[in-house]
Image (cartoon, rainbow, N blue to C red):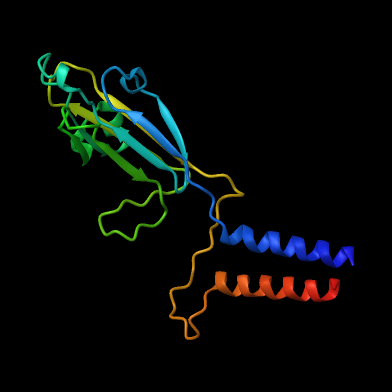
Amino acid sequence: MALVVLSLWVLTSLTWADVIPVPANRHSVYWNSSNIHLRREGYTMQVNVNDYLDIYCPHYNDSQRMVGTGEQYVLYMVSYRGYRNCDPQLGFKRWECNRPHAPHAPIKFSEKFQRYSAFSLGYEFHVGQEYYYISTPTHHHGRSCLRLRVYVCCSTDEFNPFVPKLEKSVSGSSPSRDRLLLTVTMLLLAALFIS
């Protein structure tokens, strides 16, 4: 009897492990000249597949408005050579931090490191690859380049290389729903055996 219960528990655990998603991590970067990590070459942030990178633009409150115009940047995703030389022409414009006095909070841009994008303009990231972000200041041209290298990694237990088939289901069921039905059926049978 204990063997049956243990077997059902293992089966249920394995079934639910496929259904319950692993939460993604969020990584924050404050994109401004006071972030010393961005001013030197070689700063690398490691992310996993499906993690997010949140870029916070420079932000100043109303009392700081008179001090100056505030830092403004155009951020680019570039090749390694563009990263090394801080050359935006070797990439494409990703975001523009051009509202340093935005009301209430800083402007935030988010990048999701996903293998596939349903959005036509979305970017797809590959495991084991590095991606490079640089910026050029629009407020002074004498400042040094800000740069970020992102390495997309994954742990083998969280990575699922299974790609679902894109065929229409006649019955309207899905593999997750079928596993759930199997689990519920097994639990009901176990309850009958126990009672």
Q: Residue at x 84, y 75 (%)?
A: 193
On screen, residue 73 above or below 155: above
On screen, residue 193 above or below 153: below
134 vs 20, left or right, is: left
Residue 91 percent across, percent down from the top left: 23, 40
Residue 94 percent across, percent down from the top left: 23, 41
Quadrant of the snapshot with the N terminus:
bottom right
The image quadrant that residue 69 belongs to is top left
Q: Residue furthest top?
A: 67
On screen, residue 113 above or below 119: above
Q: Residue at x 35, y 37 (%)?
A: 54
Q: Residue furthest bottom?
A: 170
Q: Choose between 121 and 129: the one closer to the eye.
A: 121
Quadrant of the snapshot with the C terminus:
bottom right
Query: What is the total number of numbered labels drawn onto the structure image?
Result: 0
74 vs 34, left or right, is: left
Residue 98 percent across, percent down from the top left: 15, 32
Q: Choose between 170 and 107: the one closer to the eye.
A: 107
The image quadrant that residue 13 belongs to is bottom right
Q: Residue at x 43, y 80 (%)?
A: 168
